Amino acid sequence: MLELAVLGLLKEQPLHGYELKKRLSDTLGFLWGVSYGSLYPALRRLERSGAIEVVDEEGATGAAVPIPATGSIGGEAAAARMRRLGTSSRRIRKAYRLTPRGEATFQELMTSEQGAGGDDERAFALKLAFCRHLPRDARLELLRRRRADLAARLNRARGSRSTGDRYSLSLLEHRRKSTERDLEWVDELIATEEGAAAAEAPQEGATAS
């Protein structure tokens, strides 16, 4: 899922590692913590696969400011050190951008179906965060698939036998209500998408100008 998050952020603009980590933490902080130890291996995997490529960070290659001669041996040595420091400070930070293969990989990951498992909630939340990059049909497919999963979960919860102590029963009831709220939320998102699609569709019987 980290690869999907990186590709989603790089769709907007090239970013270097520090900025990627910051934006990943801002975007995914409610899902998991992102460390450099997990980010840079993911970047290397994506680079090796051709999904992203390294570029010079925009604005990092400005011209050097000339340092005048001083006329003294000590001054010349200091000026030489300043020139070396200037060159070091202008060292270009490694930035990454999406490639055409990365675009295709992003679309693949966004539209792939997730199997049952503990990561389903996080996978859907992550995809929803970048849902704006999908065409409307793909957005609707994602939302409808999520609705089907929630409806099946709710049916199982309603059909489960009410056994156990009051704490376990309270937990089951909490999960059922949470699923109902999630289902209502997804229904609203679907209705909004369908309403926008209907508003953009050509009026029936309209004649071409």
Image (cartoon, grey):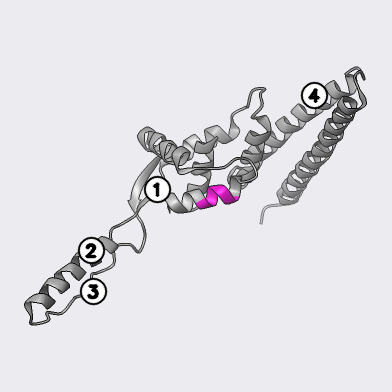
Q: Is residue 18 magenta?
A: no
Element class at badge 3: loop
Could you tell me which quadrant the N terminus lies in? top right
> Which residue corresponds to mark 4?
152
The reply to whether dot 2 and dot 1 touch (C-beta < 8 Å) is: no
Q: Nearer the viewer, mark 2 or mark 1?
A: 2
Q: Position of residue 183 (x, y in %)?
A: 81, 36
Identify residue for label 3.
65
Q: How many marks?
A: 4
* 148 on left or right of 158: left
Front disc: 1 or 3:
3
Marks 1 and 3, how far apart in space?
A: 27 Å
How far apart marks 4 and 3 lie (CA) works out to 66 Å
Which segment did they paint magenta? 22-26
Residue at (59%, 33%) from the top-left corner?
Answer: 111
Disc with the residue nearer the chain's start (2 vs 4): 2
The residue labelled by disc 1 is 96
Residue closest to the far front: 74
- Residue drawn at x 63%, y 34% as measured from the top left: 123
